Image: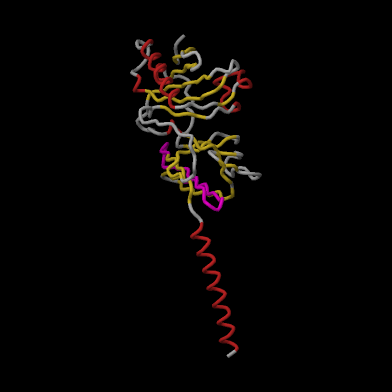
Amino acid sequence: MRIQIILSIIFSGLLIQCKESTKKSAQKKELLSATNNYNFVGDASFKFQYFSDSSYVFTIIDNDANHEKLEKFNDFCYSKNDTVYFSQTRFRYNGSDKAVIKNNFIEFIGGDFPLKIEITKNLLQTKNNLDFQNYNNYTFFIFEPKFHERYFHDKTKTLKPADLNQKELTELDQILRKCFSDNASKLEKFDKYINQCIIVINEKQEKEILINSYCKDSFHKNDYKYSLIDMSDGGNCNISLKINLTKHNYSDLNISGSA
């Protein structure tokens, strides 16, 4: 009889634990998921997931013919408006203290190196999105002085990060197209380029956009969205310029390899 009572107590305890575990599992919900897929040599991907219990999982998969690697980073964070904060621990992968959700990407800020991942699912109430339906050759990166000094040289301390609204995106496209039209004899057709942009407020409080335009790469069609391209040559497949939306003009056009 005593054995039956003990077994009954043990069984009841296990049943309660099972119910509690099931309850907790049911309450946890994926609120945001972002994934980058790369194919430099083999197949690689980054995936960030944020859950309703304030936990996150960051997964790296790296596979090639002679190598397979899987890494996972787990910790906690919290979201407010369009930003995910990593509190005291920072983001386990690159040391970022926060990540900004913007234009269907999550961009990790203040880390040891840049990281930007494309969002595939977002149940958070974020509003900072532009409509890129007619501007799918553009991608934007948040200005960070320590990573972008080579583009702005000694002026980084006087610059501040900025955003665009939809009207400004339209004007940016119009001015860039004018630049290509004005320099048609030197450049390829406009639609053959992708455009990487960094938006700042300059020392005169003007909204300025640095643009690096590169010829499209058929082998890495989406990689330009994730990180800034570093190309030292390339002729007219590597151009840069600045667009000033306050003055409504462009300047400092540079075609790689040109005098």
Which residue is drawn at the image coordinates 54% and 23% (left, top)? 200
Residue extending furthest toward the bottom: 1
Q: Nearer the viewer, residue 43 or 160?
A: 160
In this rendering, the answer to whether 236 lies above or below 133 is above
Left/right of residue 106 with respect to residue 97 in the rendered view:
left
Which stretch is magenta? 38-61
Which residue is drawn at the image coordinates 43% and 24% (left, top)? 167
Q: Residue 159 at what x, y percent from top left?
A: 60, 21
Residue extending furthest toward the right: 88
Q: Residue 79 at what x, y percent from top left?
A: 56, 44
Examine the residues drawn in magenta and state their main secondary structure.
Answer: strand
Q: Nearer the viewer, residue 11 or 58?
A: 11
Q: Residue 47 at what x, y percent from top left?
A: 47, 45
Left/right of residue 114 with respect to residue 218 in the rendered view:
right
Q: Is residue 99 visible?
A: yes
Is residue 51 rendered magenta in the image?
yes
Residue 38 image-quadrant placement: top left
Is residue 238 rendered magenta in the image?
no
